[in-house]
Amino acid sequence: MKPLLLAMPGNEHMADALEAALEMDRCPVTVRRFPDGESYIRIAGDVAGREAVLICSLDRPDEKLVPLFLLAGAARENGAHRVGLVAPYLAYMRQDRRFNAGEATSAKHVARWIGTQFDWLVTVDPHLHRIKNLVELYGIPSCVVPAAGVIAEWISRNVPKPLLVGPDEESAQWVADVAGRMGAPSVVLTKTRRGDRDVSVSVPQVERWKDYTPVLVDDIVSTARTMIETVRAVRECGLADPVCVAVHGIFATEALEELSAAGAAQVVSTDTVVHSTNLISLGRPLAAAIGGMVEAERGT
Ligand code: R5P
């Protein structure tokens, strides 16, 4: 029997792309709130004996996790053979250690909750920094889809003479991958973060790249303070107004407006988080990863 795709509300665009690319049936779900704030979940189809593939990007995760867990529970109690999670954006990856006494290592707790509800996980470029791989954290089979390929394609088609710029050492992995695929030069800055919205960056020697177009690439844009300070820094060095590319464009509150006001020539993101800046689609590589995960679990 073909696997079933079940999209949490807000993930319909990605479900449409995946349905078009995969040999899977779509199964409607109802997710709504009772007046008291609790969640009501119903699967409007027959999941018995089938593999259920739940799609839920986990930006703004606190409001999504409980309904998602209930949907996974509904799939199991109605007889699903296996339940997989496609989370194009995986939340709670940055608090991957206790920075101050008394804090929760949120990455580990959330991973444990998700790992007990699902049989496998597919995601795009999770923020792996101090923890090096997802299996170590989640304890279930997982597949990481890199966004570098589709980002490199977009830059090649849209930006003349690009210079890839990483705002901090954590971005170096994405910047090196994108630059390598295009044969473009790259530089990585040094970032100091003193608080959620208090960030500074320092730029290495960039004079020789003055006739290039800087393309800032980071995995997550949340408050955009990292991107804003990087835009300012490269412009102060005499480089052109940069293009900003986010793998996961969270864009908290006024982040996009502030980034544009700081001098970004264009702001672009992939579609792992639905946003007006989505110009780069991960549908194709995600579909390939899901297909591979389903086949692997079938033991073929
Ligand atoms: C952190 O290391 C990440 O790679 C991003 O640089 C960071 O999450 C961006 O956050 P914000 O947009 O709030 O500066």
Image: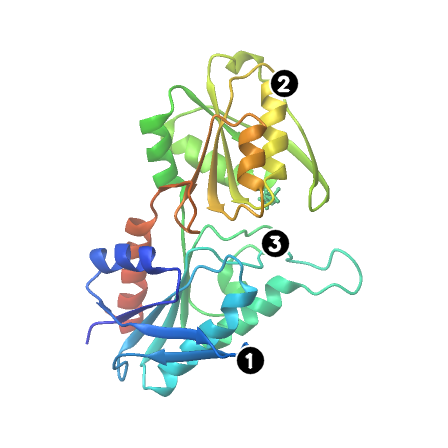
Is residue 280 positioned above or below 9 on the image? above
Earlier in the chain: of badge 1 and badge 2, it is 1
- Is residue 118 visible from the viewing direction of this image? no
Q: On the picture, is 122 further left or further right than 36? A: left
- Kind of residue indicated by mark 1: Asp
Indicate the quadrant where residue 226 lies: top right
Q: Secondary structure at mark 1?
A: loop
Q: On the picture, is 21 further left or further right than 76? A: left
- Kind of residue indicated by mark 3: Arg
Q: Secondary structure at mark 3?
A: loop
- Kind of residue indicated by mark 2: Glu
Earlier in the chain: of badge 1 and badge 3, it is 1
Calculate the distance from the C-alpha at mark 3 to the C-alpha at mark 2. Answer: 29 Å
Q: Which corner quadrant holds the N terminus?
A: bottom left
Label 1 close to label 3 by CB (< 8 Å)? no
Calculate the distance from the C-alpha at mark 1 to the C-alpha at mark 2. Answer: 53 Å
Residue 15 vs residue 115, the one in the foreground: 15
> What residue is shown with label 1?
36
In the image, what residue occupies the spot 29% across and 75% down?
51
Return the x and y of residue 282 as percentages of the image width and height: 34, 48
In the image, what residue occupies the spot 42% across and 67% down?
141
Is residue 116 positioned above or below 235 on the image? below
> What residue is shown with label 3?
94
Is residue 284 positioned above or below 295 on the image? above
Q: Is mark 3 within 8 Å of ligand 1?
A: yes
